[in-house]
């Protein structure tokens, strides 16, 4: 077979077999196009009545813009407007590294969570790289934060629960919005969970003045872990159950 | 009046011409049925995937760029759905080449022999890695040029050519003496 002037080397016998297969498929009975289209039309009519579908059917650049704007709003209202009192005292290099790395990872997750349908699905290694670097970065930020021992005599749970709750609360809208804007891509659940966790972590970086590793691991890093292990895990289990 | 191209129909559809959607479905459904039946080995499943493909075309219509070709765009959506089906199924049922191997009919090539050849070839295709199989199917059976196949499977043209070369070599090995 020629392809753009370049000859594809093919055994003549195999070529004959492939030609037979093509011919045989061409001779098969055509599908009942009218009946099939009728069902598609019904499905389309039902979907078009839903506002969620209207959102989902926006162009991918628009869906991404909505997700970026929503995440930015959450960070501004949840973190910037409730900025920690000691923010200006933090080392500038640390602040830039922490906020910059989280912003880049969050931006990457939002971008990848909303892929267009006409592109092949995200490669597993790309998804693993994004999730792995998000976990590594948030863990490193918790362990390497400028030391500040203010644990006091509170129990661990009382010590971490307010930030854990706040981080989950601000991350949840981003996660839910990504799920709403998703058109049914296979890998979105985990990436959306990652984006939710990163949003929560970024907001806590701006909002919470505590710097001890126990708090940062048990509250800030745990937000990312809970999003990935909890929400992402539940969706993964549900999709496995549906597949059975 | 000259027949409108696929891209013109898609543009008309995005602009609100519903009849264009029907026309596109009429053009693409038989092609997509062939493509999906080959993978799924079930008319019913293939019909569902074709319908789902068009539902997704509707959902993604605002992503269609005027300067792009429609066919690879639609085929990629269909192939993604087929892959998604596999992912859900985890492993598709393995139909061994041996099951399809039957003694070849001697003498003049008739319709029965052709059917056997097709079955043997399909069974051999099933034994190829998915990445090689989809290249052979799109390139040979759907007669898509390598550049378009690359676009559909999300790879480079060079990589697709390498896959095709390996696939044809492997097919020849699998079909072995049947080809002689």
Image (tube, coloured by chain):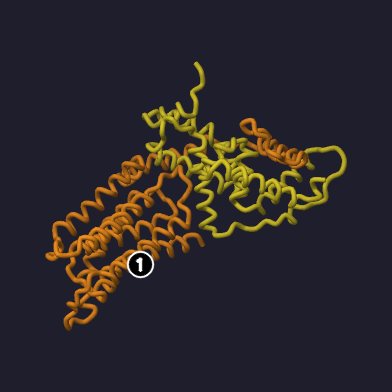
Chain colours: A orange, B yellow
Q: Does the rendering let one see residue B48?
A: no
Toward the right, the furthest residue is B107
Q: Please, what secondary structure does the residue beneath circle 1 have?
A: helix
A158 shown above or below B124: below
Residue A188: x and y in percent read 40, 55
Q: Does the rendering let one see residue A122?
A: yes
Residue B25: x and y in percent read 50, 34
- Foreground residue among A244 and A111: A111
Residue A156 shown left or right of residue B86 in the figure = left
Residue A90 shown left or right of residue A236 in the figure = left
B19 shown above or below A15: above
Q: Quadrant of residue A48?
A: top left
Tally the marks.
1
Residue at image x 75%, y 51%? B173
Residue B144: x and y in percent read 59, 36
Toward the left, the furthest residue is A85
Residue A209 shown left or right of residue B14 in the figure = left
| Residue on which disc 1 sits | A230
Residue B26: x and y in percent read 52, 32
Image quadrant where one finds the N terminus of chain A:
top right
Q: Quadrant of residue B137?
A: top right
- Foreground residue among B105 and B128: B128
- Foreground residue among A153 and B20: A153
A96 shown above or below B54: below
Residue A228 shown left or right of residue B101 in the figure = left
**Crowd around label 1: few <14 · some 14–19 · many ≥20 (10 Å):** some
Q: Quadrant of residue A144?
A: bottom left
Toward the bottom, the furthest residue is A153
Chain letter of disc 1 in the image: A
């Amino acid at each position: 077979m020629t392809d753009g002037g370049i000859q594809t080397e093919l055994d003549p016998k195999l070529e004959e077999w492939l030609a037979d297969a093509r011919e045989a498929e061409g001779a098969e009975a055509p599908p009942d196009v009218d009946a099939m289209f009728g069902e598609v039309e019904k499905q389309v009519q039902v979907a078009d009545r839903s506002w969620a579908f209207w959102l989902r059917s926006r162009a991918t650049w628009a869906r991404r813009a909505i997700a970026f704007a929503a995440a930015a709003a959450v960070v501004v209202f949840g973190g910037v407007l409730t900025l920690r009192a000691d923010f200006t005292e933090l080392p500038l290099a640390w602040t830039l590294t922490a906020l910059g790395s989280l912003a880049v990872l969050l931006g990457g997750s939002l971008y990848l969570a909303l892929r267009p349908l006409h592109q092949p699905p995200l490669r597993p290694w790309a998804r693993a790289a994004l999730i792995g670097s998000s976990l590594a970065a948030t863990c490193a930020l918790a362990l390497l934060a400028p030391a500040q021992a203010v644990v006091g005599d509170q129990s661990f749970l009382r010590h971490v629960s307010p930030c854990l709750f706040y981080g989950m609360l601000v991350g949840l809208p981003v996660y839910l919005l990504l799920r709403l804007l998703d058109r049914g891509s296979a890998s979105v659940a985990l990436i959306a969970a990652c984006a939710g966790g990163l949003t929560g972590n970024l907001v806590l970086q701006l909002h919470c003045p505590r710097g001890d590793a126990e708090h940062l691991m048990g509250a800030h890093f745990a937000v990312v872990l809970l999003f990935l292990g909890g929400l992402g895990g539940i969706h993964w289990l549900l999709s496995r159950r549906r597949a059975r | 009046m000259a027949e409108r191209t696929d891209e013109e129909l898609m543009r008309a559809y995005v602009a609100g011409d519903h009849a264009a959607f029907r026309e596109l479905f009429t053009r693409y459904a038989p092609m997509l049925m062939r493509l999906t039946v080959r993978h799924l080995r079930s008319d019913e499943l293939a019909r569902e995937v074709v319908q789902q493909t068009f539902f997704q075309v509707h959902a993604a219509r605002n992503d269609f760029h005027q300067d792009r070709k429609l066919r690879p765009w639609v085929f990629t959506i269909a192939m993604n759905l087929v892959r998604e089906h596999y992912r859900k199924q985890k492993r598709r049922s393995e139909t061994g080449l041996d099951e399809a191997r039957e003694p070849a009919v001697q003498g003049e090539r008739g319709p029965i022999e052709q059917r056997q050849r097709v079955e043997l070839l399909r069974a051999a295709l099933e034994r190829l890695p998915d990445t090689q199989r989809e290249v052979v199917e799109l390139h040979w059976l759907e007669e898509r040029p390598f550049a378009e196949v690359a676009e559909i499977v999300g790879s480079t043209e060079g990589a697709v050519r390498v896959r095709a070369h390996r696939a044809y070599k492997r097919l020849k090995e699998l079909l072995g003496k049947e080809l002689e």
